[in-house]
Image (cartoon, rainbow, N blue to C red):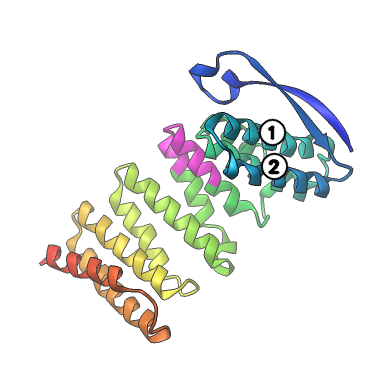
């Protein structure tokens, strides 16, 4: 292994006025293979959660990003490793709410991920990054592309994440009717648990009420009650009281 010394300008990367233009010197370990470099970078990123203060958290995050960047620099032909490193960098930038940095990294992956298993994960992250930048139309387009990916049919956890992120983005953007559509798609997805589907039906009902579509909201409540009953049949011990209470509240509000 060798070490690469890099300089990072906080003002360019972190949008923090308190840090000014002072460069930070980092010493990045370079492994012998792309897979080993990914492992090093992932281990660094795991340390971020245990940082003792905000300054250390930022430093560890930047160190991890620089380590992931080494994958792209030294093994550009290893597309799977490059995509994995890019997605991980995107996650780290998003954790700092550095939307433009996330976009810069993630958009470079677009030519690589066409017909790739990372298509939906990439566009899900891009949707989040665009939303941070208040680029609502771009965020909506990115989430729509993620939601249209055929791989979601066989990956229920990813489908859950994509549709929920998209729905919440539409809610924050003042588009509750579109949010309700996304939540209903989740509620109809038989590959995820009845409990998660019931929660999606409740979210759809709430969004429908905000949109003024009370008839659709009533159907969502009925579907939520059916899914809660299904969840109870499958696991009598599952905790469902909170969902039932919310469904009862919605019923009262819709009367």
Q: Is residue 219 left or right of 254 when viewed as pictured?
A: right
Which residue is at a point 19% across and 70% down the rendered structure image?
A: 248
Q: Secondary structure at mark 1?
A: helix
Q: Which residue is mark 2?
A: 44
Q: Is residue 163 depicted above or below 86 in this figure?
A: below
Q: Nearer the viewer, residue 187 or 178?
A: 187
Which residue is at a point 42% across and 83% down the rendered structure image?
A: 235
Which residue is at a point 76% across and 44% down the rendered structure image?
A: 40
Would you identify the image quadrant in which residue 45 lies?
A: top right
Q: Quadrant of the N terminus?
A: top right
Task: State which region is magenta.
Answer: 125-139
Would you identify the image quadrant in which residue 137 lies?
A: top left
Q: Is residue 30 left or right of 176 when viewed as pictured?
A: right
Spot the residue most to the front: 52
Q: Position of residue 180 (x, y in %)?
A: 32, 58
Q: Quadrant of the C terminus?
A: bottom left
Q: CA distance from mark 2 to mark 1?
A: 7 Å
Task: Name which of mark 2 and mark 1 comes first in the sequence.
Answer: 2
Which residue is at a point 45% across and 57% down the rendered structure image?
A: 163
**Label 1 environment density (alpha carbons within 10 Å; few <14, some 14–19, many ≥20):** many
Instruction: Look at the image and say whether residue 71 sits in the magenta stretch.
Output: no
Q: Are marks 2 and 1 in contact (CB under 8 Å)?
A: yes
Q: Nearer the viewer, residue 253 or 18?
A: 18
Instruction: Look at the image and say whether residue 135 sits in the magenta stretch.
Output: yes
Q: Is residue 219 depicted above or below 39 in this figure?
A: below
Residue 63 disc label: 1
Majority secondary structure of magenta residues: helix
């Amino acid at each position: 292994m060798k070490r690469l010394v890099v300089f990072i300008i906080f003002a360019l990367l972190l949008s923090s006025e308190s840090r000014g233009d002072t460069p930070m010197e980092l010493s990045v370990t370079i492994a012998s293979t792309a897979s080993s470099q990914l492992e090093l970078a992932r281990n660094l990123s795991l340390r971020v959660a245990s940082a003792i203060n905000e300054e250390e958290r930022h430093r560890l995050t930047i160190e991890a990003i620089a380590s992931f960047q080494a994958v792209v620099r030294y093994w550009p032909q290893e597309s799977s490793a490059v995509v994995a490193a890019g997605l991980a960098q995107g996650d780290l930038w998003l954790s700092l709410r550095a939307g433009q940095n996330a976009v810069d990294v993630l958009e470079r992956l677009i030519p690589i991920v066409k017909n790739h298993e990372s298509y939906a994960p990439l566009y899900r992250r891009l949707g989040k990054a665009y939303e941070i930048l208040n680029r609502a139309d771009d965020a909506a387009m990115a989430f729509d592309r993620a939601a249209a990916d055929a791989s979601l049919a066989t990956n229920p956890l990813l489908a859950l994440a994509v549709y929920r992120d998209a729905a919440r983005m539409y809610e924050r953007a003042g588009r509750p009717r579109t949010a309700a559509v996304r939540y209903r798609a989740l509620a109809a997805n038989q590959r995820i648990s009845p409990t998660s589907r019931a929660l999606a039906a409740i979210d759809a009902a709430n969004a429908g009420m905000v949109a003024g579509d009370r008839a659709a909201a009533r159907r969502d409540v009925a579907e939520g009650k059916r899914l809660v009953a299904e969840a109870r049949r499958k696991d009598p011990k599952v905790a469902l009281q909170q969902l039932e209470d919310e469904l009862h509240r919605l019923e009262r509000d819709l009367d």
